[in-house]
Image (cartoon, rainbow, N blue to C red):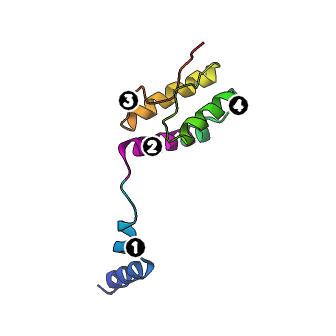
C-alpha cells in the first residue's frame, strides 16, 4: 500500500494528473491523427529500409507532404524499384493505420 501511495504522490507532484494540462491540449482531428500515424510509419520505414535507391526529389516531395500536415497535393512519383517498393510499403502502412489507400501522396503525373 505504501508503494502505491508513494507512486501516486510522485505522479501528482510531477503534474501527471494536472487537470489544467489536460484542458490545454485540444483533441486532434482525424486528419491530424492520420498524418501523425502515417508520419511515424514513414520514419520507421526509412529506419528499417534505409535511403539507398531513393532520389532526393522523392524524399523531399514526401517530406513536403508530411510538413503540410498531409494535405498537399499527391505528387510523389516513385521511379526506381526502391521507391516503388517503399511506396507500396507506405500504402499498406497507411491502410493499417486506418486511412484509405488513397491517403499517401504517390502519383506520377507525367
Does 25 appear above or below 58? below
Identify the element where label 1 is drawn. Answer: loop
Q: Which residue is mark 2?
A: 37
Q: Quadrant of residue 50?
A: top right
The disc label shown at residue 56, or none = 4
Looking at the image, is mark 4 or mark 3 earlier in the sequence?
4
Identify the residue at image location x=58%, y=26%: 76
Query: Marks 1 and 3, how far apart in space?
Result: 35 Å
Give the image location of residue 2, x and y in percent: 32, 87
Query: Marks 2 and 3, how far apart in space?
Result: 13 Å
Residue most extreme to the left: 1
10 Å neighbourhood of mark 4: few (<14), some, or many (≥20)? Answer: few
Query: Magenta residues: mostly which secondary structure?
Result: helix
Tag count in the figure? 4
Identify the element where label 4 is drawn. Answer: helix
- Relative placement, left or right, of 106 versus 99 is right
Looking at the image, is mark 1 or mark 4 earlier in the sequence?
1
Q: Nearer the viewer, residue 60 or 26?
A: 26
Q: Which residue is mark 3?
A: 100
Residue range in magenta is 28-43
Image quarter of the N terminus: bottom left
Identify the residue at image location x=34%, y=73%: 19
- Relative placement, left or right, of 106 versus 18 is right
Query: Marks 1 and 4, how far apart in space?
Result: 42 Å
Looking at the image, is mark 2 or mark 4 earlier in the sequence?
2
Q: Is residue 33 magenta?
A: yes
Identify the element where label 2 is drawn. Answer: helix
10 Å neighbourhood of mark 2: few (<14), some, or many (≥20)? Answer: some
Amino acid at each position: 500500500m505504501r508503494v502505491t501511495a508513494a507512486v501516486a504522490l510522485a505522479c501528482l507532484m510531477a503534474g501527471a494528473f494536472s487537470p489544467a494540462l489536460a484542458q490545454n491540449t485540444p483533441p486532434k482531428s482525424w486528419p491530424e491523427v492520420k498524418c501523425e500515424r502515417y508520419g511515424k510509419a514513414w520514419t520507421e520505414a526509412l529506419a528499417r529500409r534505409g535511403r539507398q535507391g531513393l532520389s532526393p526529389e522523392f524524399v523531399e516531395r514526401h517530406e513536403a507532404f508530411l510538413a503540410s500536415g498531409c494535405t498537399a497535393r499527391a505528387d510523389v512519383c516513385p521511379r526506381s524499384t526502391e521507391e516503388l517498393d517503399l511506396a507500396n510499403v507506405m500504402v499498406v502502412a497507411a491502410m493499417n493505420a486506418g486511412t484509405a489507400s488513397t491517403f499517401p501522396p504517390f502519383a506520377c503525373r507525367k
